[in-house]
């Protein structure tokens, strides 16, 4: 069933009884041309683009829980293309262009809202760095506007401009940046892939990978063995476990990142605002909740929840930036399991095992990457060639030291990116 | 979370900084080659379960500890001075 104005009218007049599930729940077949492990944003997008761009439709996405239960449904939904490093800027620029068309592509409203992002700066040195970043974004073909303090004040009158520790000097404004409804992105890709024949199989945990003569031939799952031609591991925070099934050790540590939401309020925060010096960022969801977050807890974790010290740190930062937030009541906090790579950049690559492909290392920035990553991963798996915007995301860069992509120049430690 | 520092006793987690997997104590020979150094610098066991990590008691006694922790439950199972762990490793060859 396709969404259209006519369909909504028709359903509205007939008691909304005719809506159907957005994807089927098939039993797994005995063989697929391609199996994708992990029904997060990246796995679903990979399956979608395999079908849409390459006509490969004998595909299954195997998800151990439910779709949207991982990071894709836990993040703070910031979508942007403001990277500076060669390789990253091309990739995220491509991904943002896909965002701008994907709702029409998969016929689902993901509530992508280009409300603009403002990165605040607090010193002359930081202003120079942001001016440089803005120029890099513009030369990549994206958009950036350097605002002085009065320019920021006009847009964000509620900030505390005079705070003693980090007075606000201005901001880098990225108008095409914004947010989206995270669940809807997972559902939209699932729906779009399913419509093209992809089997989405939930509650199906991959427990082993079958390799014969250096080639992947299938997987063992909680629903029995399934054979495949090619296998993509797209399991985010669980990447070390799935790769271990193929005897691989990855350059990944799993860390917890927390996020927070207040009670629903009338519209007051119209943009995404980031306060890097205080480790705090915020936007307002379409339901009215203020959604905000900060840094990692800084220790390895699979708990999908964090601890109080980071809660306090984030809330304190929020209070120093915008004291009005103190009047809002916080409803919930949660955490996600982040696949942290040593240079802060991801991996989209083949492995030394024939037919086995890897997609991981998204750190805390992989939501905006969902379309670009799916597109490039599908390209690699279908054609055997790296897709140009993602061609730098090689696994081998860590061993050779060539092409390391340390966007923030913090060095080879997983929790510092 | 509290870590029981062998020197200071039970202390709040805020006093410590996690410095990564304790395999960092196993520094390879400078000429060991790219493969070995890649294993050391980048690749990780990354267990969902019990892990040994280096933590630094920076806002306490300044000691480096090897803390044993469960990454799924956040339970802290023990802490030893990194110095002692390193000495044992050396003695064991
Ligand atoms: C609090 C928080 C805030 C964030 N904020 C942002 C943001 O503002 N902007 C941004 O760009 N990014 C953000 N991120 C990062 C982003 O959410 C992730 O990088 C991205 O979602 C990871 O890719 P994914 O969607 O494919 O992961 P997931 O949704 O985690 O998908 C992986 C899936 O693999 C499944 N799986 C694992 N093992 C197996 C197995 N053995 N068999 C079958 N299935 C398996 C899991 O169940 C899971 O569903 C944030 C993350 C968090 C936690
Ligand atoms: Zn101590």
Image: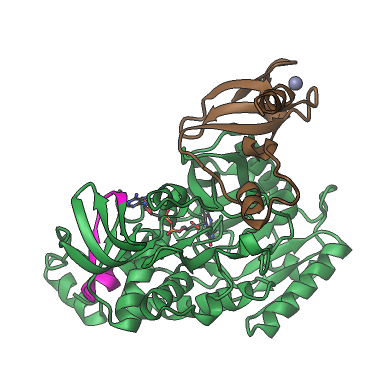
Q: Horizontal and vertical percent for residue A297?
A: 61, 41
Looking at the image, is A96 positioned above or below residue A182?
A: below
Residue A86 seen in render: yes
The quadrant in which residue B16 appears is top right
Residue plotted at (56% across, 55% down): A364
A18 with respect to A137 (left or right) = left
Q: Give the drawing colour for chain B.
A: brown
Residue A207 falls inside the magenta stretch: yes
Residue A130: x and y in percent read 77, 69
Say left or right for A364 vs A108. right
**Pick the front one: B11 or A325:** B11
* Quarter of the displayed picture in which ligand 1 can be seen: bottom left
Q: In this view of the protein, can residue A159 be seen by the observer?
A: no
Residue under the image location 62 percent in, 33 percent down: B53
Residue A102: name its quadrant: bottom left
Q: Nearer the viewer, residue A179 or A389?
A: A389
Up the image or down, A372 lies above or below A156; here it is: below
User: x%, y% of residue B55?
Assistant: 68, 32
Give, as a single range, the part of the protein colored magenta.
A191-208
Residue at 69% across / 72% down in the picture?
A: A84
């Amino acid at each position: 069933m396709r969404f259209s104005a006519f369909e909504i009218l028709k359903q509205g007049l007939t008691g909304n009884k005719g809506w159907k599930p957005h994807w089927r729940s098939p039993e797994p077949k005995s063989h697929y041309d391609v199996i994708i492990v992990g029904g997060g944003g990246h796995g679903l997008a990979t399956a979608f683009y395999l079908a849409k761009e390459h006509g490969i439709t004998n595909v299954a996405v195997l998800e151990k829980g439910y779709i949207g239960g991982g990071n894709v449904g836990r993040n703070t939904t910031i979508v942007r293309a403001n990277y500076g490093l060669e390789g990253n800027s091309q990739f995220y620029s491509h991904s943002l262009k896909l965002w701008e068309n994907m709702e029409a592509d998969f016929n689902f409203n993901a509530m992508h809202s280009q409300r603009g992002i403002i990165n605040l700066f607090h010193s002359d040195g930081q202003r120079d760095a942001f001016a440089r970043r803005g120029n890099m974004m513009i030369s990549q073909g994206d958009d950036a506007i350097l605002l002085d303090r009065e320019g920021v004040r006009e847009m964000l009158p509620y900030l505390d401009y005079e705070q003693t520790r980090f007075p606000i000097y201005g901001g880098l404004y990225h108008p095409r940046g914004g947010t989206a409804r995270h669940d809807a992105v997972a559902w939209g890709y699932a729906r779009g892939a399913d419509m093209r024949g992809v089997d989405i199989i939930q509650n199906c945990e991959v427990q082993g990978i079958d390799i014969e003569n250096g080639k992947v031939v299938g997987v063992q799952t909680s629903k029995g063995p399934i054979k495949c031609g090619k296998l993509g591991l797209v399991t985010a925070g669980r990447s070390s476990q799935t790769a271990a099934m193929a005897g691989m050790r990855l350059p990944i540590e799993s860390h917890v990142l927390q996020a927070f939401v207040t009670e629903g309020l009338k519209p007051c925060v119209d943009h995404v605002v980031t306060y890097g010096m205080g480790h705090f960022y915020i936007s307002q969801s379409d339901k009215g909740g203020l959604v905000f977050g900060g840094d990692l807890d800084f220790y390895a974790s699979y708990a999908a929840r964090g601890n109080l010290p980071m809660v306090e740190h984030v809330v304190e930062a929020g209070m120093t930036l915008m004291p009005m937030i103190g009047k809002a009541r916080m409803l919930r906090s949660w955490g996600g399991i982040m696949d942290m790579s040593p240079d802060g950049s991801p991996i989209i690559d083949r492995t030394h095992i024939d037919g086995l492909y890897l997609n991981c290392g998204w750190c805390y920035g992989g939501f905006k990457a969902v379309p670009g990553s799916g597109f490039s991963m599908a390209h690699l798996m279908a054609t055997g060639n790296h897709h140009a915007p993602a061609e730098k995301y090689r696994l081998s860069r860590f061993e050779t030291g060539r092409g390391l992509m340390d966007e923030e120049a913090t060095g080879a430690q997983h929790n510092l990116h | 979370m509290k870590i029981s520092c062998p020197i200071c006793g039970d202390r709040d987690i805020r006093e410590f900084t996690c410095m990564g997997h304790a395999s960092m104590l196993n520094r390879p020979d400078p000429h060991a080659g790219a493969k070995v150094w890649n294993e050391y610098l980048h690749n990780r066991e990354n267990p969902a379960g019990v892990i040994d990590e280096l933590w630094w008691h920076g806002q306490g006694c300044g000691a480096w500890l090897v803390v044993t922790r469960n990454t799924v439950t956040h339970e802290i199972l023990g802490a030893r001075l990194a110095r002692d762990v390193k000495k044992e490793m050396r003695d064991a060859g």
